[in-house]
Image: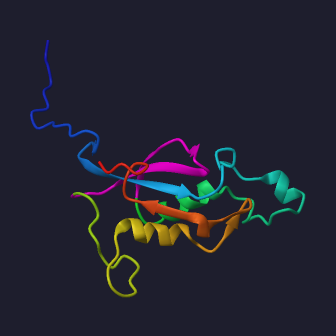
Amino acid sequence: MAQLFKRNDAIVAPFFKNGVTLQFFTITFTGADLTAKLGADNAGFVAGTYTAEQAKSPVAKAIENIHARVSIEILGTPRYASSDTTLVIGVAAIGGDYPADNYDGITGTETMATYLTALVKDGGTYQGFAMSGAAVAANVRGVAL
């Protein structure tokens, strides 16, 4: 029986995904339990509590803002603990972790986590959560890999 061997295959856990390095980030939504706010609040929109934009999930909006700039490959499960909701994501980082660079195109350099934080803090409020209370850190819930 014929067999196919992948002679150059190597797994480097936990960062490997078909040849692309994964860089992990944790999004923290401070002071709120958002685990039940993962979809749009259509009832709040219909009742006039929210505009169509404000009815969006704050978690989904953060993911949307980040995904506009990097490729999100892994989404963890939102977890509520110690009065904060956290969400771990893994983004494709071809060639290794993103270095500090001028990602925002304004002045100076910033880390990718700082840049992603700026994207998440879009000035909006979604389902009552102000995105100014969100931050992104380059790790998995405080544990550097």
Q: Residue at x 45, y 67 (%)?
A: 116
Q: Is residue 83 magenta?
A: yes
Please identify the residue farthest to the bottom as the structure is shown.
Answer: 107
Give residue 67's position: percent from left, percent from top. 48, 60
Q: Is residue 98 above or below residue 14?
A: below
Give residue 100's position: percent from left, percent from top. 29, 72
In magenta, the rendered stretch is 71-95
Give residue 9's position: percent from left, percent from top. 15, 36
Please identify the residue farthest to the front as the structure is shown.
Answer: 82
Q: In the rendered view, does 71 fall on the left or right side of 16?
A: right
Give residue 81's position: percent from left, percent from top. 57, 44
Viewer-nearest residue: 82 or 60: 82
Image color mode: rainbow
Q: Quadrant of the N terminus?
A: top left
Q: In the rendered view, does 83 fall on the left or right side of 49?
A: left
Viewer-nearest residue: 6 or 24: 24
Which SS type dominates the magenta stretch? strand
Q: Residue at x 64, y 45 (%)?
A: 35
Q: Is residue 60 above or below residue 105?
A: above
Q: Is residue 143 above or below residue 117?
A: above
Q: Residue at x 26, y 49 (%)?
A: 20
Q: Is residue 59 above or below residue 18?
A: below
Please identify the residue farthest to the top as the structure is shown.
Answer: 1
Q: In the rendered view, does 105 fall on the left or right side of 2?
A: right
Please identify the residue farthest to the left as the structure is shown.
Answer: 7
Q: Is residue 63 magenta?
A: no
Count of numbered circles in the view: 0
Q: In the rendered view, does 22 fall on the left or right side of 63?
A: left
